[in-house]
Image (cartoon, rainbow, N blue to C red):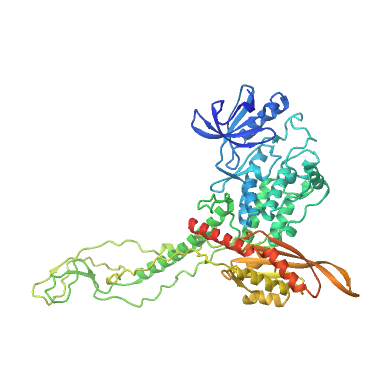
Amino acid sequence: MNLQDLGIGSVIGGFKLEKELGRGGMGVVYKAHELSLNRKVALKILSDRLCNDEEFIERFKREAKVVAALSHPNIVSIMSFGEEGGLYYFAMEYVQGTDLGQILKERRQLPLSEAMGITSQIADALSEAADKGVVHRDLKPSNIMIDSVGRIKVTDYGIAYFQDADSHLTRTGLYMGTPEYSSPEQASGQKLDIRSDIYSLGAMLYKMLSGEVPVSGESPLAVVAKIMTEPVRPLAKVNPDLPKLIYQLVEKMMARDKNKRFQTPADVINAINYCIDKLRIEPSPARMVGAPVASHRPPTVSAYRRRAKTIGAVAGVIAAILLSMWTVDALLNRKAKVETPVVAVEEPAEPAGGTPAEPPGVQVPTTVATNAAPPAGSPEPVEAVVPPSLSGTTDRGEEVPPPVPTADTAREAVPPETIAALPSPQPQVEVVIPAAPVQAPPEPRVVVAPPVEEQAVRPAPQPRPEPVKTAKIDTRTQLPEIPVVLMIVSGDETLAPFLRVHLENIIRGSGLRVASVTEIPVLRQKMQFGEMPVSWYDIKQIVPPGAAHILLISDVQKTGTMPLQFYGRTQTLTNAAVTVRAIDMETGEAAGAPGTATMKYTPLNMDQELQKAADTAAGGMGGQIRMFWKEKRQASDSSG
């Protein structure tokens, strides 16, 4: 049997082929139906031209064993393995979704929260592989599947190998992998360990946050040569809108010296969680291409931890308040005295037009002690004790905030004598007490009531208030139909003011609202002192919520000059470059494709040439922003 003889509808090993999912150097992957168990699988079949190569057959068999040894929710599981008619195959879990490579083709780059969530899940999968001594060797976006709820699945351990495997199966010096995401030691053919996968994961995070690969070249060999000889372009130069902690994270993951990288995937996870907590990022899974944000998202470790902290803090405060109120109320009730017995009177029904009678069984106190003073020894306000180990600073010299008081700390702070002072039940004795006569002609019946030497005073029943009907309030943040665009232009002091005017005209002309820097006091103050921030993250921290929805950042810089001579006169021809980027103020996601333009001008035609450059760089930006905002509002409505 040959692989070429197989097609849609063919059956091999009890699997009916339904659709080709991918084709690579080792074989073909099909979506198939397992007839015996009536389930969908991904069936990988080794290329028939390799079936006579014993080394490739051994590698193919080993892939099945490698994946079978890895049991993790973020790794595609293997179901069966076999051979039929000279063709080797194995069935894997079928993931209904798309791969990260396709998502990045459609969306170019991802918001910080989404990229961090994806990276954390991949690192968790690598941690399982590291425990089994397995190196993937080919981590790249196309090998990362994402299902409909944003769960990550690492696939294609086809060139993975055990670190203690026989050398003839994974020969040192044989390059395997995708060049753009390969580590320097992999590019040079050295022995690999899990730190090589950590480098590749850092390269993928670089790609997700910038839309560009760390190293590019005209050919795979050119890329490999650059990886071995040239430093990676800093992420801050490709995307200057990220926090400094993120640059440091990527830089450490992609250190050229593997001894300077994170040494284990667990170290990567800890660093990611540190960044998430420090920057207050809520990690979110990737969205499939063309799909709204899923309402069900798999929680991450840090999300669980923050949720537990919040619930614990709220429960602790409520418990402390209720315990204090209960204790004070019990002490007041214990001290209160009953001066006369309480009589229960049943009066006859009210005559027509008379005063309403008390309903049967209602206790009416004749005398009530009022204005009871708080007892001595009432508990003081509860203060939570902060353990010294949870306060102070980290090893980086950063302050750690004290923990929020919890129910346990509040409970420990309550004095024992307060708990002991709670009232205990008292025995009751029945006696007959004549009730006061009533004005109605019939004599009332006297009912026995139990006088108690010392008991809590029960207040007279108050009429129950009518419930107040209130309208249900929708607490979700409503996105306006038309977003407000905050425009920040930096660069050459001569060109920037003119460029700002042209860009404002372009954006307003597309029907969008524009907010000026001068309309936001904190930005106006920073502009006056020459401290205007130019990155999305820094601007987001100081702009009031709701003041702007889209951030338009533009930069204009002179790139060179040359003299011009005409009619005996000399003029200077100046070259300049303009860049324009639209960013979602909430998430940092690109709200449109970035625009660029170059211009050449003299002092006589500077404004005209600058207007042409603005039209080239941002002419379609308004329409892209409107489309982005429309899709965001639709996603918000569907998820709400």
Left or right placement of residue 535 versus residue 494 in this view: left
Where in the figure is residue 528, as x and y percent of width and height?
Answer: 71, 78
Dividing the picture into quadrants, the one containing residue 532 is bottom right
Residue at the far front in the pictured view: 567
Tell which of 369 and 138 is nearer to you: 138
* Residue in the image at 58% along x and 57% along y: 282
Could you tell me if residue 388 is visible in this image?
no
Question: Where is 155 relative to 487, above or below?
Answer: above
List the single residue furthest toward the right: 568
Q: Nearer the viewer, residue 140 or 559?
A: 559
Compared with 479, 307 (above or below) is above
Q: Residue 602 or 470: which is nearer the viewer?
A: 602
Location of residue 385 in the rendering, given as x and y in whole percent from the top left corner: 56, 63
Q: Position of residue 52 (x, y in %)?
A: 71, 23
Q: Is residue 562 left or right of residue 635?
A: right
Q: Is residue 189 above or below residue 628?
A: above
- State the image quarter where residue 425 is shown: bottom left
The one of 380 and 357 positioned closer to us in this rendering? 357
